[in-house]
Structures are given as structure tokens and as C-alpha cells.
Amino acid sequence: MKALLISLALVTIACSHTQPYTRTRVVNPQSSAIEQRIIFVGDAGKATPGDAVWAKLDRYLTKDALVVFLGDNVYEYGLPDASENDGSYELYAARLSAQINAAKKARKTIFIPGNHDWNSSRSNGRKRILAQQRFVTDRGAHFAPQNGCAGIAAEPVGKGSVMLFIDSQAVIDLPDDGAAAAKAPASDCAIKHKRQFESFASDYLQKNIKPGTRIILAAHHPLVSEGSHGGFFDWPHHIFPVYNYNKYFPLPVVASLVVFTRQWGWITSTDISHSKYRKYLNSIAAILKNREVFLYAAGHDHNLQLFSGTGPVKYHLISGSGSKRDAVTHNDQTLLAWEKNGFFVVDIYTDASARATAVGDTVEEELVFELR
């Protein structure tokens, strides 16, 4: 058994792209003026004011920019509510403040929730979402969607474009249907189960989004990924069973078992292979039937990724390395795969063209991609 596990590990181990893997980059400057700049920063929940990523972010901030924090804004357990008397409150509040202050020059800053903000779906998760919502709004930022309920929030982003926000963890945690909802704990949210969310979201798009509108969809959980949540693990993960939390306690065989069970979807619903996550993907597919989304922006995996041609989504962006970094590989649709702390800048121009720029916190070179 031990020999088999080692053999399997050797077959599946590959190296992460610590140097950027790129395809179809552009180097020529854009001649049109920027109509709207959107900066996507994800998984910045361990941020401190002196982080190199904030100095780099400041270079790209303009008075008209929109900054979107893509969830996992507070590691590890979300922002405690005052009623919890949690001794970690000051530490976690400081991490949120670092993000708010770093983006203060922007026109608007919007936070969306991630699984850690929900305290990994524990019983006090929604309480912590509401605490974070109050914290950021009291300091001039915005929270979307609001109140820890499955729904959609919208933000105009230039002429002919709109950004829609989904609390993907709230959707993942919804019961499947009305029968399952009847057995679940009572909720004061209007949307009680996934089928209801799908119906609501489809109606929302039909009634509120005019044909021809360019849609940008932002949520914490990606639809596709070549990072660890998508099933890719490089060699350290086969040595350290909890590599992202402890790099000093090697257990090679156990670590490989952890890798394989995650790839098979047996451990955590934060992985794309898990049945609950797959149901989220099915819900999004149902909502987007006969619709095209220009860009889906997510965090969750701690790296920078850009894909083209993934189903109803024309481009898919993962910007999840605001304060953490982890392994990543590539597939046939990959335009960029980079294990690097940083963020993405998406510029929409007055001629309706768009570009995505990947920015590494300690690298001067810009990695620019045309979004057609």
C-alpha cells in the first residue's frame, strides 16, 4: 500500500508556475482612454498595512477606479460580532482596515464574502458576515450582496457594462430544493433553496440586464481552476499534510492521502470536486443558459489565473493572492498561471475594448492580456 501511494504521488506531482506561464500576451499600449478601471484583489484576509501588494496597488489606483475584494477578507474565521467577546477581534479588524485603507483613493471599494468570512459555514457564520458588513460600511466601503443572503447586487461599470455580485458561499450552503429547505433551520432570507435562487437570478437577468450589455460576474468561488481547489498539488503538498498552514511537519504518505482524497472530493466543499461545489456550478450554468458573461472574476485559489473559452463565460479570472500564495498549473484554456502575490487590473476603454493586467507585488513587468 505504501509503495502504491508513493508511486501514485510520483505520477501526479508536477511543479507550480512560480514564474508566470503565459499565452497571447500583448505589449503595445492601448490608444483609447480608460472608461472604467476595476481592480480585483482576493483572499487578502491576512493583510497588514506594510504588505508589498499595497504599495503596488497604489500605483494603479485612480479617483475613478473600482476596487473589488473577492472574499476571504478575514482569515481564518471571519470578523467576530461584538456579542461574541472574541479576543481575536482586534487582529481581524486590523486586517480588514488594512484593505480599506489601501484602497481609499478609489472611487468605490466593494467587499464580497468568501468561505472564511462565513467561518467555514459554522453556526455563527452569518453573524460574522453581518459584522463584516457593518464594519466596512461604517468606514465608507460597500458590501455586496448584503445581509448574508443568496441574491444578486449590481454595479454599473462604464457605458454598456455591468458588474453583478454573488455571495457564492451563501448559494453553496442553500438546501437543494423546497423539501430540503423545510427540514433546514429557519432563515429570514427571502431565498430559501437553490432552485429558488436559480429562478430568482434568471428572472433578475431577464428583467434588469438589457440585451447586448457586457456582464462581469464577481463571486468568491471560481467555476474553473488549475490551483489546489481545482485539484492541482505540487510536491510539497505530498510531503506536508497541511502545507498551507504548517510547512515544518512532514508526513509523506499521509500528505499524499490528503491530496488524493481532496482530488476525489471527499474532504471539503471548498474543492471543485466536492458534490456541494458541483451543485453550485450547476446552479450558475442554469442561470447563464442562453446568456454570455464577458468575465467571471473570483478568488479562492491563492494565485493569479486567466482563462479563455470556458462555457458561457468568455473569460475567467482568478485573483486570490492578496495575502497568500499557492501552487498552480495550466490547461488548454489558460492565458496566465502564476503562483505570485498580487492582483488583476481590468481596464475597459472608450472604444469598448478591454484588457486584463496581472500585477505581481514584487515584479515590475506587467502581464497584459487583450479581452475581446
Image (cartoon, rainbow, N blue to C red):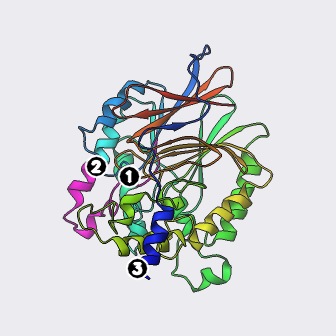
Nearer the observer: mark 1 or 3; the answer is 3
Tell me what residue is drawn at x 73 percent, y 37 percent.
213
Which numbered marker is on residue 95? 2
The secondary structure type at the circle numbered 3 is helix
The quadrant holding residue 259 is: bottom left
Labels 2 and 3: the sequence-earlier one: 3
Q: Which amino acid, by three-letter code, is at mark 2?
A: Arg
- Residue furthest left as drawn: 87
Q: Is residue 23 above or below residue 219?
A: above
Check disc 1 and report the residue beneath it: 73
Q: What residue range appears in magenta?
A: 68-94
Instruction: Say which of 204 and 338 sits in front.
Output: 338
Give the image location of residue 105, x and y in percent: 37, 28
Nearer the observer: mark 2 or 3; the answer is 3
- Badges 1 and 2: C-beta atoms under 8 Å apart? yes
Measure the alpha-carbon separation of dots 1 and 2. Answer: 8 Å
Labels 1 and 3: the sequence-earlier one: 3
Measure the alpha-carbon separation of dots 2 and 3. Answer: 42 Å
- 212 with respect to 103 (left or right): right
Q: How many marks?
A: 3
Check disc 3 and report the residue beneath it: 2
